[in-house]
Image (cartoon, rainbow, N blue to C red):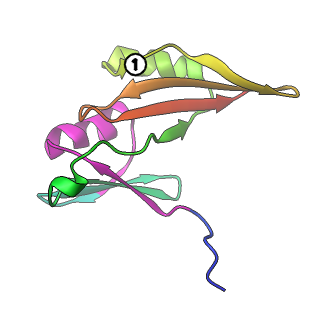
């Protein structure tokens, strides 16, 4: 049967592709697979991020929040701040289940999309 197995790709609308490529490649350190004049594909541990200039107004809105999992959220947060990433808040606990704490911090990309770092400690 055709059951969904995993998310294979996430589309992120952009208004300035060069600026967005710089953000995801140089500030988030994601490997750029390839790009054209209107789109770029990044690898994120088996998940593809698809940056694209909107084909029309229907697609010209901000994307879903992407939660990037990191090992050490405070260290990654500090490195990204030093690179100039615009954070909305500081790393904080959002949930605690048993001995596991889930930490998050939210940031904006250059295209005004909101994303997050998350870490389970």
Q: Residues within 10 Å of mark 1 (few under 14, many from 20)?
A: some
Query: Position of 83 compared to 90: left or right?
Result: left
Query: Position of 60 compared to 117: left or right?
Result: left
> Where 65 sits versus 13, above or below?
above
Residue at the outermost bottom position: 1
Q: Foreground residue, 69 or 55?
A: 55
Quadrant of res 64: top left
Residue behind mark 1: 87
Numbered disc 1: secondary structure? strand
Q: Position of residue 18 (x, y in %)?
A: 15, 43
Residue at the image position 64 percent from the left and 76 percent from the top: 3
Residue at the image position 64 percent from the left and 30 percent from the top: 119
Residue 26 is inside the magenta segment? yes
Determine if residue 53 is in view. Answer: no
Q: Quadrant of the C terminus?
A: top right
> Where 16 sits versus 105, above or below?
below
Which residues fall within the magenta stretch?
A: 7-33
> Where 86 sits versus 57, above or below?
above
């Amino acid at each position: 049967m055709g059951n969904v197995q995993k998310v294979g790709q996430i589309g992120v609308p952009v208004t300035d592709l060069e600026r967005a490529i710089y953000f995801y490649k140089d500030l988030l350190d994601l490997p750029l697979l390839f790009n054209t004049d209107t789109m770029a594909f990044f690898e994120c541990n088996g998940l593809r991020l698809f940056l694209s200039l909107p084909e029309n107004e229907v697609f010209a809105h901000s994307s879903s929040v992407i939660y990037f999992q990191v090992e050490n959220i405070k260290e990654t947060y500090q490195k990204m701040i030093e690179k100039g990433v615009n954070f909305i808040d500081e790393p904080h606990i959002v949930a605690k289940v048993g001995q596991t704490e889930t930490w998050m911090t939210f940031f904006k990309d250059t295209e005004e999309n909101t994303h997050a770092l998350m870490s389970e400690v």
